[in-house]
Amino acid sequence: MASVEYPYGSEPYSTLEVRNIESHEPQDPGISNKEAVLHPESQYPQIVDPQTQVAWDAAKLEADSSSESVEVDSTDKTKRRTCGLSPRVFYIVLAIVIVLAIGAVAGGVAGGLVSRQNESSAASSPTPDTTTSNVNILNTSNLAASNWTDAQGIVHRSVFFQDPYSNIIARQWDSQNKTWGTRNISRLMQSATGGPINPKPGTYLASASSDGGQTPLYEVQLWFLETANDEDTLSWVSSPNPRGAPYFWNYESSGIKTWNNSHLAAAWQRCSDDKCDGYWVVAYQGPSGYIKVANSSNWTDTNNGPALRTKAAAAEASLALLPSLNGTYVDGLTLAAQRRPSYMGRSTLQANGSWKQDDGKILEKVDPLKTTQFAATMMNSWNEALFLTLSNDGSVDAARWDENEYSSIPEVTFAQGQSTNFSAIAMTTDAMFYGIADDQIWEYSIDTSDPAIFTLAGKVYL
């Protein structure tokens, strides 16, 4: 700490000397530059009355000052004193206290700022988005969610988004403690040999989880876009042991090039005979505009035809992908895509591996210029489905598949909701809805008997 300058010359110090305690040798008062208080009764210091000592010190200070003299009343040396001190001594002490207090406050503020800066610098991106007042979620963040059930029948859920530094954050539901845990995926991948990851700010996200197969396989995957040489490519991270090692994630890049700002949708496709662990599938829009579904059995296979041809797809088409019943097995796939001129269309995977591109309309009057995102979930043992559209005004429209046909839902009611002006939405396959609003993530459960009613379950992130 820098020294404090005194306004009245050099810093005051005591010139009091007690005889016979500084040295065992006799001292000559004539060669000492200190005043001494003699103690004839004893060689040890004696107690001095505080008032007498204060008055003596004040008189000495005033006598040494040539620029300012104050007449001292010999009959009352304690006049004009504050807290037992002369005005000059009091103000000197007061100045010192004020300077020290200001220094302490400044140090505390600086320490707090440094601490917050260190926390922020731990994120993978050095500069947060400052265009909004968001402190939890990137203002252009999208949302993804998936679920799986372990061998004990306990349901696990994961919700993914980007924070203001564009880091990918996972909130994962702890069924035992009924709490949400946080995993900063971007930070976890910084030390990985396959990482770090560089997700595009505001990238669309897609997640799927597996909980079956011959192993059985428990795994969580998340897909996102990265940009290199002005081209968007499809990448993903996976948690191969979400129960035992929730902080361990792997990173892969498929090398698949996409339409800039392509929407994404993902699913885990089961095998028809339970003799394999199934396949990861992700829908995306290719550079020329077609919609395609890539399969983990061979990500680089370019021979599979598109699920929707280029001329039928809208630019930056919203997507939703669901596992579906194929007879008695859930090894089918249903794709909902934004089609021109203005509707949500259905494509279905056929037994020969090709796609039936025009398999009916799911929802009419879906304007691609006013639509932000699609989401979907299954209900009633995979026999029914619910599809949602999010408009750029934050409103949600829905359509229901009830084994025979699609029917629109006139109005979705968010019961007990605090905010429904959503900027992004997602659903898990067990009929849970998630939405970003007011820099928070809200969770709703869907009444499968009446899917027009969404009941507030709580907040995932705030």
Image (tube, helix red, strand yellow):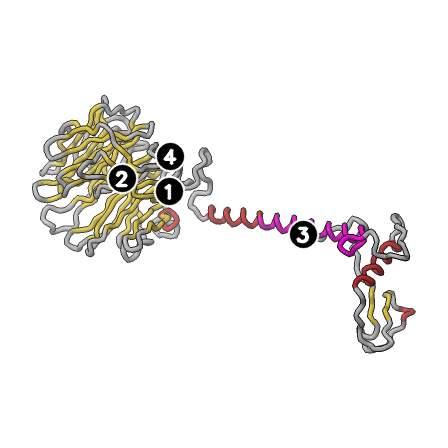
Q: Position of residue 15 (x, y in %)?
A: 83, 63
| Disc 4 crowd, CA 10 A, few/some/many (<14, 14-19, 20+) | some
- For marks 3 and 4 on the same chain, the one whose residue lies earlier in the sequence: 3
- Which element carries disc 4, helix, strand or loop? loop
Q: State the residue at coordinates (13%, 39%).
A: 383
Q: Could you give the CA–CA distance between mark 3 and mark 4, rounded to whole angstroms?
A: 46 Å
Q: Position of residue 269 (x, y in %)?
A: 17, 44
- For marks 2 and 3 on the same chain, the one whose residue lies earlier in the sequence: 3
* Quarter of the figure with the N terminus: bottom right
> Which quadrant of the view contains residue 400?
top left
- In magenta, the rendered stretch is 81-108
The three-letter amino acid code for the residue at tag 4 is Thr
Q: Could you give the CA–CA distance between mark 3 and mark 1, rounded to whole angstroms?
A: 47 Å
**Can you name the residue that lies furthest to the top here?**
341
- 423 or 254, nearer to the observer: 423
Residue 82 included in the magenta stretch of the image: yes
Residue at image mark 3: 100
- Which element carries disc 1, helix, strand or loop? loop
Residue at image mark 1: 198
- For marks 1 and 4 on the same chain, the one whose residue lies earlier in the sequence: 4
Residue at image mark 2: 455
The three-letter amino acid code for the residue at tag 3 is Leu
Mark closer to the observer (3, 1) = 3
* Quarter of the figure with the C terminus: top left
Circles 3 and 1, Cβ within 8 Å, touching? The answer is: no
The disc at residue 140 is: 4
Q: Could you give the CA–CA distance between mark 2 and mark 3, rounded to whole angstroms?
A: 56 Å
Query: So how many labels did they put on this image?
Result: 4
